[in-house]
Image (cartoon, rainbow, N blue to C red):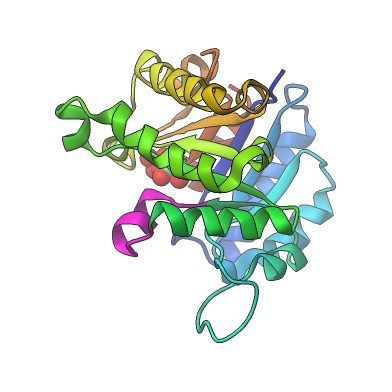
Amino acid sequence: MRPLTIIGNWKLNGNLASNEVWVKAVCQGMEKGMPAGRKYAVCAPFPYLSQCDQLIKQCSLAFLRLGAQDVSAHLSGAYTGEVSAQMLKELGCAYVIVGHSERRQMHHETDELIAEKALQALDQGITPIICVGESADERNSGREVEVVRGQIAKQVSVLQDRLADCLIAYEPIWAIGTGKVASAQVAQDMHRAIRLQLAEFDEDVASHVGILYGGSVKPDNAVELFAMPDIDGGLIGGASLNPQDFLAICQA
Ligand SMILES: O=C[C@H](O)COP(=O)(O)O
């Protein structure tokens, strides 16, 4: 049985004061009791990882962890501005997002680079959250499965059975930050397609990999999404900024 995993992605948001309020509110809410067997994390901007690590440690909830939003494909060296997986490990990260569509689009990240980043994370015992998803044009022209299959194929070819230690996040670009959530059935269909593709490589890997849905998840649509058999949780952007909304999604 795959655990439900719900991860907040703050993107380029937060400050020292608001981060403290957020972590304390979420910890207080979670301390009152959460559904058993679930995992939760928040992916904060790099400069706030240390602060959030300290705050999360203070509330000592084993199921609430810290994550980062990106990682270098290199371990060390002359790579100005990069942050290595080893550094993230030192700062308490258990997860890192790789290949978010915003990085694919704005920073021209390729599937090859994303797989290298995932390998760096795995080498440090950090779970990579590998993002895939199609654009509105790709879906409107009926190519959504082909596009996502291409993204997954590269991860399979590089990561092989190490994929069993990764999470995949299906995030249709047209649903990110738009309020246009994929219907639970549309999301389930793509999650199923991804799992079947993984099973072509290895059935054991396919049954173990958690596939999260991301794209306008809110407290009022989370229950239906998370009830789908191949949806193993969510990657939450905008709604994760409000601690009460994030808690409500975590409890959905
Ligand atoms: O990483 C999160 C996704 O990009 C979803 O963002 P959103 O919930 O604001 O649509």
Q: Is residue 238 visible?
A: no
Q: Position of residue 102 (x, y in %)?
A: 35, 54
Picture layout, residue 3 above or below residue 185? below
Q: Nearer the viewer, residue 49 or 110?
A: 110
Which residue is located at x 51 percent, y 61 percent? 14
Residue 139's place in the image compared with 43, above or below, is: above
Residue shown at 56% from the left, 63% from the top: 71
Q: How many labels does the image show?
A: 0
Q: List x then y, in percent, for residue 199.
A: 56, 22
Residue 105 within the segment the image draws in magenta:
yes
Q: If the picture is divided into quarters, which one holds ligand 1? A: top left
Report whether residue 157 is seen: yes
Please tell me whether residue 133 belongs to the stretch shown in magenta. no
Q: In which quarter of the image is residue 76?
A: bottom right
In which quadrant will I find the N terminus? top right
- Residue at 59% x, 72% y is 83
The magenta stretch is 98-109
- Who is closer to the viewer here, 25 or 124? 124
Which is more toward the observer, 55 or 135?
Answer: 135
| Quarter of the figure with the C terminus | top right
Find residue 13 and report its horizontal and vertical position in percent: 46, 60
- 45 with respect to 113 (left or right): right
The reply, left or right, for residue 128 in relation to residue 111 is: right
Residue 85 in percent (x, y) is at: 66, 65
State the image quarter where residue 226 is shown. top right
Relative to residue 43, is residue 76 depicted above or below? below
